Each structure stands twice: as structure tokens, then as C-alpha cells.
């Protein structure tokens, strides 16, 4: 048993160190002094919302303060049958914004994936060359769109994934989510840099409208409730192998709030995990299984030690092979995300995360979850 656990642990340590080195070698992008010109792409910001009356106005004000020219972008708010004042508030702000704010009320019709429907209908009316998606509970900095546009002009990428960070609420639960989120952001960024994209987040995602149309949008993946980000990215990466990039820039960070309760966290992560079964690319599927197996190895090791099948030295060795590379990698990502105070929560997360991965890996096999006050399958 020890030999198997050792092989898995060494493989995981080697993989994590590759991610760390890749992250360190990625250049932090800065916007040139003369970034905006006549050739700057026109941007359509798409915000799918449902019951976001308290947070959406803050995001719309953030977009009002963009350094990117207001006549160079539009904002489409796709309201998915909100039962609060989200739509009314959006409509009331139309004349107050310097940019073109376009509310899009969606019919309350049954659908497997409400978010994909909202994005698809928004893209159909979008006038931008670039589609930028985010969520109604997010906040963005003033140089967000300018940074995206400049990076696109320099790289010509068909899809650009941006960094996500949580607004620190100083709670233990919030800090643990921040560390976990940094692992997803970092791993997604590094696999893009290595040429086999695996993960991204629709709260900060950009892609060419023509690339979306070239891969037939969400066709073939619209039966999956989640996956408006990763599954679409896999389709675009298949069509444009060198066209998926990560935008490593502090000015491109999108901030959102951690899940407030265990129940909300459970349903969000189960929704994310549900798309694993729909992966059509081989490498992301292999990676998902590898991560699951590697994290399962730690509780197995602890049980083996408890039953006397492993020595203390063997236990410490396997734990170190997982903990040390993770500390180097996660610490680097958290520093970039300006979350240094959260570094001290890495060891706590390392204790919880193996159980978390195993739990949601199994939970994802069951259909159904709650999202925006609705049950989806």
C-alpha cells in the first residue's frame, strides 16, 4: 500500500511544482501608455442576473468608472425573471450611464441551463467584437475593460480568462473559500500557459463573438446546467489550439463574495462539479480523476497510519509531498491576488480540501441542485 500511495504523492508533488514554476514564469501584463486607439475592439459586457437588486447597481457603477471609452462598450443585463426589483432598477439606470445600458428581460420558460440561455440571447443582440461575461454580484476595477482590450490587441486570443478573487469577509469560512478559489484560478491559468486549458470562470471571461459563432456557441453542451465557461472554453480551444490565454494582471481581477452559508456553498460547488461528466476533452477529464485520486490518497494514508499499516516517517513523508508544493503554489497565487493575510489559512485548507474533493467528486454523480432559488437537473 505504501508504494502505491508514494507513487501517487510523488506524481502530485511533481505536478504541483510544475504549476508553481509555470505561474512564476508567467509575465504580469501591464497596459501600454497608448492602449486605446481607433483599432480598439468594441466590447459587449454581458451580465446574466436573477434577483441581484442589491449588488447589480454597484457593478453598473463600477462600469461607469471605466478608463475604457464609454462609447467603446455596451452593457447587456439579461434578467432571468427576477422576483425582486433587479429589472426595474436596471431600467431606471439606462439614462444615467455614459455607456449604452441594455436591459434584456427573459421569458420565464423551462430550461436546463438558464445562464447559457441568457448569454446566448444576449450575444444575439450584442454589437461588440468581444464578449465579456461577469456576474451580477461582482465588482470590477476602473481599468478592467481597458486591460482586457489591450491584452486582446497584443495576443489576438480567441478566449481570455481573467482572475477572480473573493472580497475578504475575515471569517474562517470566507478565508477557506479564498484559498480554495486561488487553487482553481492558478491551476486554470497554468494549464492554459502549458497549452491544455482545463478551468476558467464565467465571472471574468472574454471571447470573440466570431469565435463563439464559429464553434456553434453552446450547441452540444446546452443540456448541462453548468459549463457556460469551461465547456465553451474547451470547444474554442479545440477549434483554436493556441487561442486560449490567461490575463495575469492585478487590474483585471474581478472581485466577488464568498458563499455565505454551507448550504449555498454546497449547491454552488455541486453545480460546478456536475459539468465534469460533460467534458469532451480528454486531458481535463484525466486531470479531474488525477486530482480526485491524489486527494483521496491523504485520508487513505491517515487511515492506514491509524490501523498501524504505515510508520510515522512514512506518514510525514506523504503529507509533506502534498503540503509543501501546495504551499509554494497557493502562496504565490494568493500574493498576486493581494490576499497575503489569507496565507495562514493554507494549512487549514490543506486539512479540509482532500475531504472536500472526495465529497464533491461523489456528490457530482447525483443529479439536481439549487441555483438562484430554483432546482435544476
Image (spheres, rainbow, N blue to C red):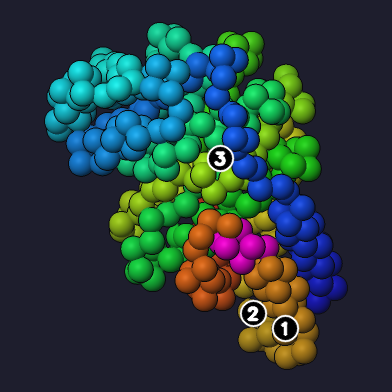
Residue 294, compared with residue 100, is above or below; it is below
Residue 330 colored in magenta in the image: yes
Quarter of the image with the C terminus is top left
Q: Residues within 10 Å of mark 1 (few under 14, many from 20)?
A: some
Q: Nearer the viewer, residue 141 or 288?
A: 141
Q: Position of residue 81 (x, y in %)?
A: 23, 24
* Tags 2 and 1 touching, CB below 8 Å: yes
Judging from the image, what secondary structure is the residue with disc 3 in? loop
How far apart are the two marked residues, 2 and 1, measured between alpha carbons? 7 Å
Bounds of the magenta span? Answer: 329-335
Q: Which residue is mark 3?
A: 162
Q: Position of residue 3 (x, y in %)?
A: 85, 73
Of marks 3 and 1, which one's residue comes earlier in the chain?
A: 3
* Tags 3 and 1 touching, CB below 8 Å: no
Residue 6, compared with residue 190, is above or below; it is below
What secondary structure prevails in the magenta region?
A: helix
How far apart are the two marked residues, 3 and 2, measured between alpha carbons? 37 Å
Which residue is drawn at the image coordinates 42% and 54% (left, top)? 166
Q: Position of residue 195 (x, y in %)?
A: 78, 37
Q: Nearer the viewer, residue 6 or 232?
A: 232
Which residue is drawn at the image coordinates 34% and 59% (left, top)? 262
Of marks 2 and 1, which one's residue comes earlier in the chain?
A: 2
What is the quadrant of residue 105 in the picture? top left
Of marks 3 and 2, which one's residue comes earlier in the chain?
A: 3
Residue 159 visible in the shown view: no
Q: Residues within 10 Å of mark 2 (few under 14, many from 20)?
A: some
Residue 242 colored in magenta in the image: no
Q: Which residue is mark 2?
A: 302
Q: Which mark is residue 315?
A: 1
What is the quadrant of residue 243 in the picture? top right
Amino acid at each position: 500500500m505504501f508504494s502505491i500511495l508514494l507513487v501517487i504523492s510523488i506524481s502530485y508533488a511533481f505536478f504541483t511544482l510544475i504549476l508553481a514554476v509555470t505561474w512564476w514564469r508567467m509575465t504580469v501584463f501591464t497596459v501600454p501608455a497608448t492602449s486605446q486607439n481607433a483599432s480598439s475592439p468594441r466590447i459587449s459586457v454581458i451580465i446574466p442576473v436573477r434577483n441581484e437588486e442589491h449588488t447589480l447597481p454597484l457593478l453598473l457603477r463600477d462600469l461607469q468608472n471605466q478608463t475604457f471609452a464609454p462609447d467603446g462598450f455596451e452593457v447587456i443585463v439579461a434578467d432571468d425573471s427576477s422576483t425582486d426589483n433587479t429589472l426595474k432598477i436596471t431600467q431606471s439606470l439606462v439614462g444615467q450611464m455614459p455607456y449604452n445600458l441594455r436591459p434584456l428581460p427573459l421569458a420565464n420558460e423551462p430550461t436546463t441551463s438558464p445562464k447559457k440561455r441568457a448569454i446566448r440571447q444576449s450575444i444575439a443582440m450584442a454589437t461588440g467584437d468581444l464578449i465579456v461575461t461577469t456576474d451580477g454580484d461582482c465588482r470590477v476595477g476602473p481599468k478592467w475593460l481597458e486591460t482586457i482590450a489591450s491584452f486582446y490587441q497584443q495576443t489576438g486570443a480567441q478566449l481570455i480568462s481573467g482572475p477572480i478573487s473573493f472580497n475578504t469577509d475575515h471569517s474562517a469560512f470566507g478565508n477557506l473559500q479564498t484559498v480554495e478559489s486561488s487553487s482553481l484560478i492558478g491551476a486554470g491559468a497554468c494549464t492554459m500557459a502549458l497549452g491544455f486549458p482545463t478551468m476558467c470562470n464565467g465571472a471574468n471571461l472574454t471571447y470573440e463573438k466570431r469565435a463563439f459563432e464559429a464553434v456553434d456557441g453552446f450547441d452540444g453542451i446546452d443540456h448541462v446546467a453548468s459549463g457556460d465557461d469551461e465547456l465553451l472554453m474547451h470547444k474554442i480551444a479545440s477549434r483554436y489550439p493556441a487561442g486560449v490565454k490567461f490575463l495575469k494582471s492585478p487590474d483585471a481581477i474581478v472581485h466577488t463574495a464568498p458563499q455565505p452559508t454551507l448550504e449555498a456553498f454546497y449547491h454552488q460547488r455541486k453545480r460546478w462539479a456536475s459539468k465534469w461528466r460533460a467534458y469532451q476533452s480528454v486531458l481535463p477529464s484525466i486531470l479531474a480523476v488525477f486530482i480526485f485520486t491524489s486527494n483521496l490518497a491523504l485520508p487513505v494514508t491517515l487511515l492506514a497510519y491509524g490501523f498501524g499499516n504505515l510508520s510515522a516517517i512514512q506518514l510525514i513523508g506523504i503529507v509533506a509531498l502534498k503540503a509543501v508544493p501546495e504551499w509554494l503554489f497557493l502562496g504565490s497565487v494568493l500574493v498576486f491576488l493581494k490576499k497575503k493575510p489569507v496565507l495562514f489559512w493554507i494549512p487549514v485548507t490543506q486539512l479540509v480540501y482532500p475531504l472536500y474533493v472526495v465529497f464533491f467528486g461523489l456528490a457530482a454523480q447525483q443529479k439536481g441542485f439549487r441555483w438562484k432559488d430554483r432546482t435544476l437537473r
